[in-house]
Amino acid sequence: MGTPDFCVPILQSLIDNYNVIAVVTQPDKEVGRHKELRKSPVKLLAEKYGIVVIQPEKIRKEYNEVTMRKPDLIVTCAYGQIIPKEILETPKLGCINVHASLLPKYRGGAPIQRAILNGEKETGITIMYMDEHMDTGNMISKEVVEIKEDDNFETLHDKLSIVGRDLLLKTLPDIINGTNESIKQNDSEATFAPIITRDDELIDFSKDANTVYNQIRALSPFPGGYAVLDGEIVKIYNSRKTNDFYTEKQLGEIGKIYKDGIGVACKDGEVIITDIKFAGGKRVLMKDYFNGHDGDKLLGKIFNKGE
């Protein structure tokens, strides 16, 4: 049971090593101006192998098609809906979840992005039994993954997806044989990772440079952070930090032009924006933008929150 790209290596490993009788994923979504239906990455992979695909709008009410198949084990990963008791009690080996954090930290739907936003140095994968609440079940196995200074959502997402695949394959034999152990989570240590909202995407250059840098990389490449320049929304996808500090500049002001970007004043330093999408344009590296534009014309302009 899963939906996005993160699940694809995990599903592929299950198909290669076990008998996958069905896949549950979110309904196809309308995208673009023409509202064309788009299948989830998990559905596309399942269809490639001729596996039955189940797509309930609300699985809490539409669970019969899952329970009637009487699976021995259910594996979930980034599915996007709370699994009802009727399903949890169906498989004789239980329902397990591949979660992209070191539980009980970062329970919820955006653990990768929240870990980067908060400046964490490490995260990981937890294989856990599922219960009726969100990410609260007993933990079976874990693996730690370092969050590097230059990781963004995409790079960390891809690393965790592979770690999740490998840890699941390592853990499954003990679950199937009934020899695995599980540990109850300490709820007092729990932190939460709610889904990213539009407010989370708004970059506030009045904060310290490290916070701004973390926000930009946590949202890159999707959905992308944004700020307002000359009354227009600008998307910001990548940046780097320096030790410079513009005491004479306003917060959010473009104070210096570099070969690869524009220096923007923050509370305690500077963030150099290197990958951007100006209003009405395409995403572009600043070093390429400078080939056809005079970067000095950006000096003195101020990014703001559009308030």
Image (tube, grey):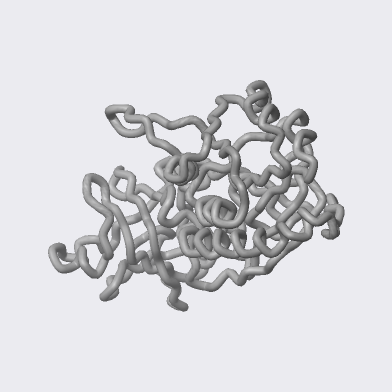
Q: Residue 185 in the image: x percent, y percent?
A: 83, 53
- Could you tell whether 123 is left or right of 72 in the image? left
Quarter of the figure that contains the N terminus: top right
Q: Is residue 223 visible?
A: yes
How many badges with numbers are in the image?
Answer: 0
- Write the residue at 77% across / 31% down: 85
- Write the residue at 44% across / 76% down: 242
Question: 62 or 243, which is in the foreground?
Answer: 62
- Could you tell whether 293 is left or right of 262 in the image? left
Up the image or down, 217 lies above or below 80; here it is below
Quarter of the figure that contains the C terminus: top left
Q: Residue 192 in the image: x percent, y percent?
A: 69, 48
Q: Is residue 113 visible?
A: no
Question: 1 or 72, which is in the foreground?
Answer: 72
- Write the residue at 56% across / 25% down: 57
User: Residue farthest to the bottom?
Assistant: 243
Q: Residue 104 in the image: x percent, y percent?
A: 76, 54
User: Residue farthest to the left?
Assistant: 292
- Could you tell whether 261 is left or right of 71 in the image? left
Question: 138 or 269, which is in the foreground?
Answer: 138
User: Residue farthest to the top?
Assistant: 61
Q: Quadrant of residue 163?
A: bottom right
- Write the residue at 78% across / 55% down: 175
Q: Residue 256 in the image: x percent, y percent?
A: 31, 71
Up the image or down, 196 lies above or below 249; here it is above
